[in-house]
Structure formats: structure tokens, C-alpha cells
Image (spheres, rainbow, N blue to C red):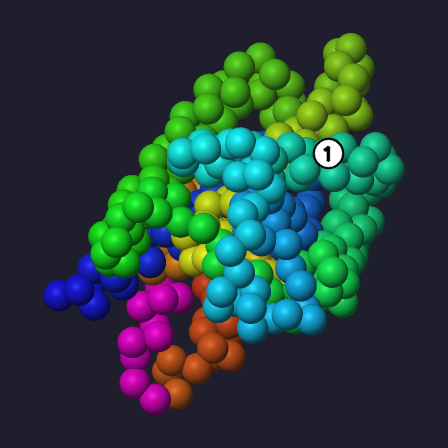
Amino acid sequence: MLEIVNYLAGFAILASVYAVLALGLNVHWGVTGLMNIGIAGFFALGAYTTALLTTPPPDPAKFEQFVFGGNLPGLFQRWGVGGDLWFLAGLAAAALVCALVALLIGLVTLRLREEYLAIVTLGIAETIRRVFLNESWLGNGSRGLYQIPKFLGNLAAPWLYDLLYAGVALALLLALFFIVERTLRSPWGRVLRAIREDEVTAAASGKNVFRFKLQAFVLGALIMGIGGGVYAHGFRFIDPFTFDPLLATFIVWVMLMVGGSGKSAGALLGALVIWGAWSGSQLLPGYLSNPNLRYLLLGVAMVLVLLLRPQGLLGRR
């Protein structure tokens, strides 16, 4: 029984994280038309930011002590952020760092055409991942960061913690969903949709297209950073390989395409359907559970959706 509870809790946490990433991508691509292929970069930035602020500083020379017996508090604890407020502070820091990085990237790249923007964001995401991989002083290199603290960590039973944290992740997802939905239904959101449909007409109507694109890019990256923070405290271990482009970028695009680009609810539904299919296929026997086959099936599913129902399951008409 406990194994089933643990599996469902882990599924709910990861599905919530992917739904948050898909929400951010929907702001970029589904609403504004910005082709961001660097989701993994913002995902990694969010996770590493909150992890570095809440765990002991990495010391590759004392790896065993760091993993198994390090007692130094994280920066937030040393700064007096007590109780469980450090968790919210970590998420806020992750969102802020991703927003600042997106602002710098957007100032340089958002005047590029779609295909060039996609290439640049992919390159930046890989650069971020390689920095964390090669600079051991920053994130402990390929060994990653362990002992990331638990939110509500006073609960002794691991299965109970996983279950409650799944509830926290779902609550954060719903809060982000309602905030994003209200924002996109505002006049500001309608300008973004106008830019996606016809950028020239939006500019002719007196809208500063570059400024609106930059704001949308920062908002989407901020949301992705929160997803990274939720992931870090849910699984309490991150390394650069966690943010491989296949599982941190490609699969998020499939989720949005299947659920429905342009609809926040479509991003949530796509995350649930695709992650359910991905994690459920691990239970299949033999070669059917092979990750390479699952990647192939995801690609086929995306092509079929684009051919047969390009608006997705819940997409706009």
C-alpha cells in the first residue's frame, strides 16, 4: 500500500512540475509566439538557485562529509529566515533569478526571427547546464547537490512527507494557473495574442511589440523557475543530467502541443496525459519500457496531433 502511495505522490509532484513548465511555455509560444527551446535552462536555474540558498555550500574536496554529515545551514537559515519561510523565499529567489536572466537574454535576442530565437535559447540552455557541470565550486559538478531540505520537514514519515508535498505542489500549480489565466484574459494578454496573430498590425495599432514580447518572455521564464524550485525540494537531489534537453525541453513541447497551445488548461491537461503515458509505460514488460522507444512514441504522438488535431485537445479554434 505504501508503495502505491509513494508512486502516486511522486507522479503528482512531477506532473505538477511539468505542468508549471508547460504554463510558462504557453506564455512564450502559445500566447505570444516566442519559440523558446531553452526551457531546460530556466528549469535548471530555478532548481539550482533555491538549492544553493537552502543547502550547505558545495565542497567537492569533502564530498562524503557534504553528502552524509554536513551540518552547515544554508544561506537562508544563516540570514535568519526561520520556520518554513525559507521554502517560499527559495521559490521567490528562483523566480527572480530566472526573470533577470530572461530580461538580459530578451534584450539581446527578441528582435531576432523565430528560428534564430529558438537556436539562441537552445544554446543558452546548454551553456547554463555545462556551467553547472564543469564548475564544481558552484554546484558540485556532476555529483550534484544532495540534502536539499524538506518543506514541512518536521514530519518524520517519508511517505507522509511525499504525500503532503504533492499537495503543496498541486496547490502552487493551481495558484499559478489562476494568476496566469487572469493575466492572459486582461488587455495586456490580448495584446500578446494580437502580436502572435499579426505583429505588424499590432505595431501599427500603436503597441510597442518589443516591450510586450520582453514582458511575456520574463513572465514565462519566471514561471519555469518556480517549477525548478518545486522540483528541487520535492526530490532533494539535482545534478546537470537532470536537465537533459529531452526530458526538460522536448517533452514539455509535446505536452503543450498535445494539450492545446494557447490555452492554460491545455498546458495542464497535456502535462497530465503525456507524463501519465511516460511514467505508466515504465511498468510495461521488456522492450516496451525502453526509454528510446518511449521517445519515439512521444515524437509520433506529437506528429499525429499536429496532423490530425493541430489545435490540441483543448486548443483554441
Tag 1 secondary structure: helix
Is residue 263 or residue 180 the one in the foreground?
180
Residue 197 seen in render: no
- Residue 1: x percent and y percent? 13, 66
Q: Residue at x 35, y 75 (%)?
A: 282
Q: Residue at x 75, y 50 (%)?
A: 121
Q: Is residue 269 left or right of residue 144?
A: left
Name the residue furthest left.
1
Q: Is residue 86 left or right of residue 133?
A: left
- Residue 11: x percent and y percent? 33, 58
Magenta-drawn stretch contains 281: yes
- Residue 26: x percent and y percent? 55, 39
Secondary structure mainly formed by the magenta segment: helix
Is residue 86 or residue 289 the one in the foreground?
86
Residue type, mark 1 in image: Leu
Magenta-drawn stretch contains 195: no
Region rendered in magenta? 277-286
Residue tagged 1: 100
Is 76 located above or below residue 201 in the figure?
below
Q: Residue at x 31, y 68 (%)?
A: 280
- Residue 157: x percent and y percent? 23, 56
